[in-house]
Image: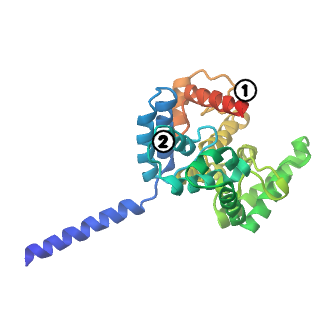
């Protein structure tokens, strides 16, 4: 009887351990670094099949992103299709359509692939429209107001910009409290009336705000949660170091402005927030520009 009781206790403990592992919050900086590692495997080392295998494992561990320029989920799908590997078929293509929905008609360039797996243009457009209509109205009204104010007078009048930055800092805090981070998947790249929403630009303006310590802490947390991107966080911090502290950049976000003397340290800093190395980033950027020019 005692042995059965001990066995029962062991089963309970194992169940609790499994539940704990499944519910523990994932740190997306780990995800971004793994994406960078896998990206270099096929982009630099030219080992696409190994990259596919590692991508598949990663996307089972983390819900995928499709970051600007590096486009990890898109590359996983296309590489898998090219080498006749299973990437999840329609299920993951639907997921991919939702990830690129913020770019509006971006699905159109992928229609040949979608049709190959039984998704026509009407269905892809419908899935995109579902995402558009899923956005919170009050959030969209608020974020649109914020960006209109952010760009008032093209920021040529320092006094007007300073006044607006104070108002926008307060509004962004309210957005954080009520909606969390206004990520690409929550708000997209265009607000009401096609107002452009460049989040990196806005937060770079917060680098001179008296609320910078608050935003630095909050964005770092949102980065770990997978809402804020490494680029959005690092751009704000680098601008603070350049313009407020009059110091060297930590992450090399503005390469054309300030020369980087210690690339080893900068690359360590970049990895700490999920950015690819400077050299790897240059290759990604060149490939991205080639893709744009080709299209």
Distance (Cα) linking label 2 and label 1: 39 Å
Q: Which residue is mark 2?
A: 80
Q: Position of residue 264 (x, y in %)?
A: 51, 25
> Quadrant of the image for the C terminus?
top right
What secondary structure is marked by label 1?
loop
Residue 33, above or below 40: below
Please identify, in this view, whether the residue under mark 2 or under mark 1 is nearer the observer. Answer: 2
Q: Which residue is mark 1?
A: 257
Q: Position of residue 286 (x, y in %)?
A: 64, 27
Query: Which residue is located at x 73 percent, y 50 percent?
Result: 105
Query: Which residue is located at x 59 percent, y 38 percent?
Result: 70
> In the rendered image, which quarter is residue 9 located in?
bottom left
> In the rendered image, which quarter is residue 258 located in?
top right
Q: Nearer the viewer, residue 225 or 157?
A: 225
Residue 214, above or below 175: above
What secondary structure is marked by label 2?
helix
């Amino acid at each position: 009887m005692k042995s059965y009781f001990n066995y029962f206790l062991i089963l309970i403990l194992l169940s609790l351990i499994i539940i704990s592992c499944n519910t523990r919050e994932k740190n997306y900086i780990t995800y971004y670094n793994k994406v960078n590692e896998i990206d270099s495997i096929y982009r630099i080392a030219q080992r696409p099949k190994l990259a596919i295998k590692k991508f598949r494992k990663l996307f089972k561990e983390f819900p995928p992103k499709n970051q600007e320029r590096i486009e990890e989920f898109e590359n996983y799908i296309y590489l898998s299709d090219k080498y006749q590997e299973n990437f999840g078929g329609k299920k993951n293509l639907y997921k991919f359509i939702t990830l690129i929905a913020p770019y509006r008609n971006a699905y159109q360039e992928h229609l040949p692939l979608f049709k190959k797996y039984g998704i026509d243009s009407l269905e892809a457009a419908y899935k995109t429209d579902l995402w558009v209509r899923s956005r919170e109205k009050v959030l969209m009204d608020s974020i649109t107001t914020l960006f209109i104010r952010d760009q008032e007078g093209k920021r040529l009048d320092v006094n007007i910009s300073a006044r607006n930055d104070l108002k926008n800092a307060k509004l962004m805090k309210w957005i954080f409290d009520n909606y969390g981070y206004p990520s690409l998947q929550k708000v997209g790249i265009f607000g009401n009336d096609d107002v452009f929403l460049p989040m990196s630009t806005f937060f770079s303006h917060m680098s001179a705000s008296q609320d910078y310590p608050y935003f630095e802490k909050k964005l770092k947390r949102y980065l770990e949660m997978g809402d804020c991107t490494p680029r959005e966080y690092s751009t704000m911090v680098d601008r603070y170091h350049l313009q407020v502290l009059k110091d060297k950049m930590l992450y090399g976000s503005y390469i054309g402005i300030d020369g980087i003397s210690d690339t080893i340290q900068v690359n360590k800093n970049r990895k700490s927030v999920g950015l690819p190395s400077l050299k790897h980033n240059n290759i990604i950027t060149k490939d991205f520009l080639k893709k744009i020019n080709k299209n």
